[in-house]
Amino acid sequence: MSAHVILLGSFFLILISGAPISVALGLSGVIAIFFGLDMDAVANMSTITYASIAKYPLIAIPLFILTGMIFERSGVAERLVELSRAIVGPRRGGLALVAILVCLIMGGMSGSGPADAAAVATVMIPSMMKEGYPRAFSASIIAASASTAILIPPSIALIVYSIMVPGVDLRALFAAGLFPGLLAGLAVAVPALIISRRNGYGSDSGASRPPLGRSFVRALPGLFAPVIILGGLRSGLFTPTEAAAVAVSYGLIVGLFLHRSMSMRDIYNVLAESAQISAVVMIIISLAGIFAFAGSILGTFDAAAGHILSISDSPMVVLILVMFVVLLAGMVLDGVSIYLIALPLLMPIMATLGWNQVWFGVLMAMNVAIGQFTPPVAVNLMVTAKIANVPIEATMRWVFWPIFAMILSVGLVIAFPSIALWLPTVLGYKV
């Protein structure tokens, strides 16, 4: 049996047995190296594991996770909802638009779809229920719009992509994800508004509209967070990792002194919870290093890429096939795991077909975003359905429409790469 079959076969067998993704990655890599090389290579696994996470840019991941949790606990979401309601006003489908807008803004703080979904659903679903929105519909729209957090900077998945693909500027990736993220939000808003108006969801009269000026002032501390992060990156004042540290400091200032909504106990809780989440992510990354080392040294990824390229001579056919596979993976795996598993395989294909690495990274993120609210796993949808107290099966009739709309938005970015590449080009980043 070849080492290629051992690596990929053992990975899928271990994964479907119910083992965590990190265990499947690390153990399959060790098995393949043991049979394909020798015991000396197995003895070096500790060094490979350490080298996978001993990278300065990776410090940004736990810091941005902490940033998202701090802003979630500091009352920022409630104030953004108030501002969005003041902007949108009472109208049919108005609260659905408010939820989408808040998700887009929150995505600029957390970089995590599930965290975005939890924060917005907790605030919005009770209000939407009062205005006649079905629980399942509300859960579906919030889950779909929260998935844009993987595109709108700072995106944790794009940080992982920049580390794994040599020569990619993270600032260019962040800039490239902005317009596709807004396009994805618009793609969710269109069916949400049509369905709401057709079924009479929401009120177009009688509902109170918060004063715009007061709401804007109250939401300013939260609105400044993306400005500080992206403005600092653009000006060169700090690196992406330093931006994450600044974002944490600013979030603490907002929660403790401006909103005065966080206690020392809250700070302890967010530190503990973010540490747990960060530990899981880092364990996955470290053990994925063994998998990547095994696939590279044994030539498995080059062989698999050759098989994919042999399917068709058309780069577009290969791209659509790759996007479909990434979408399927997004239904059952988190974004970080998908990048760690798929990129060693896809990088030879990118090089052979000459795909722009920044553009391709954004396309991957868009497909992963769709997977985050596409059953059977649909991590965002699981979060919002639990908060709405509905079974995930009840969302099926509603979630199809944002899935279809976001697939169309992926098609637009494929057809018009400038949607992603225009902004980083204008800002002078290497694309």
Image (spheres, rainbow, N blue to C red):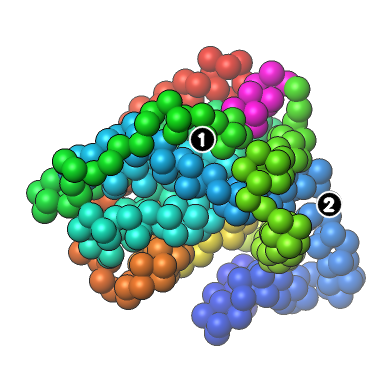
Give the magenta part as a residue range. Answer: 227-236
Q: Earlier in the sequence, mark 1 or mark 2?
A: 2
Mark 1: amino acid:
Ala
Name, please, the residue furthest toward the bottom. Answer: 17
Q: CA distance from mark 1 to mark 2?
A: 38 Å
Residue 360 left/right relative to 170: left
- For the N terminus, the image quarter is bottom right
Q: Position of residue 202 (x, y in %)?
A: 20, 49
Residue 370 left/right relative to 205: right
Q: Nearer the viewer, residue 248 or 166?
A: 248
Residue for badge 1: 219
Q: Would you say residue 258 sits in the magenta stretch?
A: no
Residue 135: image tag: none
Residue for badge 2: 54
- For the C terminus, the image quarter is top right
95 relative to 421, above or below: below
398 relative to 31, above or below: above
The answer to whether residue 3 of the structure is visible from this angle is: no
Choose mark 1 or mark 2, whichever is in front: 1
The answer to whether residue 406 of the structure is visible from this angle is: yes
Q: Position of residue 290 (x, y in %)?
A: 74, 64
Q: Would you say residue 235 sits in the magenta stretch?
A: yes
